Amino acid sequence: MSELYFSEIKEIKAVLSKIKHTQLFVLVDNETEKHCYSLLKPYLGTHVLISVPNGETNKTLATCTLIWEILTKHEADRNALLINLGGGVITDMGGFCAGTYKRGINFINIPTTLLSQVDASVGGKTGVDFEGYKNHIGLFYEPLCVMIDTVFHHTLPDNQLLSGFAEMLKHGLIADMDHWKALKEAGYSNINVELIKHSVTIKEKVVKADPTEKGLRKILNFGHTIGHAIESYCLTNQQELLHGEAVAWGMVAEAYLSNKKGMLGKSDQEEIEEYIRAAYKIPEIEKTSYPKILRLCKQDKKNQSGEVFMSLLEKPGKATFNISVDEVLILKALDHTLKLKF
Ligand SMILES: NC(=O)c1ccc[n+]([C@@H]2O[C@H](COP(=O)([O-])OP(=O)(O)OC[C@H]3O[C@@H](n4cnc5c(N)ncnc54)[C@H](O)[C@@H]3O)[C@@H](O)[C@H]2O)c1
Ligand SMILES: [Zn+2]
């Protein structure tokens, strides 16, 4: 497991002095080059900046080739060190490039979105998309350390903060109701390092117990079976909805299912739902599209032979996995979650 420094980025100087390296490379995208690089640069010595175009569409092998080419052009050896400065796209892709260049060089993650701070930069999953499949090519490869500083939040738009906040709410719901309460009290715009640290600790504990997702790690998918389906649907229907925002609505639907499956109590389900409805904008999806979303749910990686399996809430603060949910119930959950708009 990597070491975590929940600190101000100026401490990177001390961190770097402890890591033996021959050359330093910093990977950014055009947005983090504009908003984040100047905050880090004063604390770095000589380094090479690698800037790639931003966004999920550039999380590809073609962009990796650009990164590997620059490392090669500068004759980076096996003791070169890479800093990934960016959101989940940069930490996933930079981690993958580091893991494969000369069979692996060291890297540090400095995540700059709330989502990447609480989720993408921890857990060791790295990779890129391939021929339309998300994270299709990749490997488990750990950063030497992850540095988390909320200074980067100042330039993040509200929807990006809300997207990361949803993953934090999920951490509370699956493992720690005090965390859920603290998050509700703070609100998405007042997230501090302590709250981020707690979310990361929850994720790390689960990942440590099951690094390759054979069992327990699946609980991190609460809200994601229906959330991913809503996300994919909105993507193909030109409706802007970020991953975490879709997961928030997925959690409303899956909390409903947890109750229907005789696990989560009604008042707990209602508390979750009320909070998410007040904090998140509901996507505009008509009833006629529910079968399409159901089909997308069935494509989920966790399913076996046409049956849909989900990670649901046993009770507040405790999740369970591999729960089979039938189609009729999924359609009911979609209706319950999305209908109020119409
Ligand atoms: N490895 C994992 O376990 C894991 C977990 C969750 C998500 N992910 C991956 O993470 C990616 C999503 O991450 P994301 O939401 O951070 O997306 P992202 O990296 O695309 O960042 C979102 C946008 O914000 C910009 N940005 C980043 N930091 C900024 C800042 N401080 N100020 C202003 N703009 C800034 C980026 O340039 C980008 O345009 C997906 O590819 C997903 O697959 C991986
Ligand atoms: Zn997620």
Image (spheres, grey):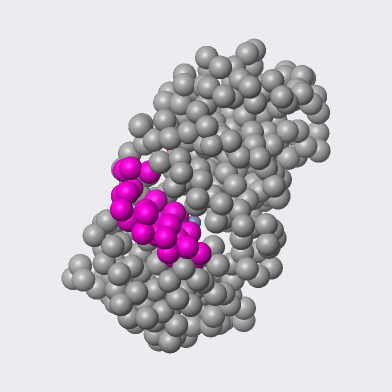
Figure quadrant of the C terminus:
bottom left
The residue depicted at 59 percent of the width and 47 percent of the height is 122
The residue depicted at 41 percent of the width and 79 percent of the height is 264
The residue depicted at 66 percent of the width and 29 percent of the height is 82
Q: Nearer the viewer, residue 304 or 22?
A: 22
Is residue 263 in sight in this rendering? yes
Q: Point out residue 199 in the picture as x, y percentages from the top left corner.
A: 50, 52
Is residue 51 in sight in this rendering? no
- Residue 121 is drawn in which quadrant? top right
Q: Point out residue 329 in the picture as x, y percentages from the top left corner.
A: 40, 84
Residue 178 on the magenta segment: yes
Left/right placement of residue 206 relative to residue 234 reads right
- Residue 20 is drawn in which quadrant? top right
The secondary structure that most of the magenta stretch takes on is: helix
Q: Start and end of the magenta stretch?
A: 165-191
Q: Is residue 9 above or below residue 164?
A: above
- Residue 192 is drawn in which quadrant? top left
Q: Point out residue 44 in the picture as x, y percentages from the top left corner.
A: 59, 17
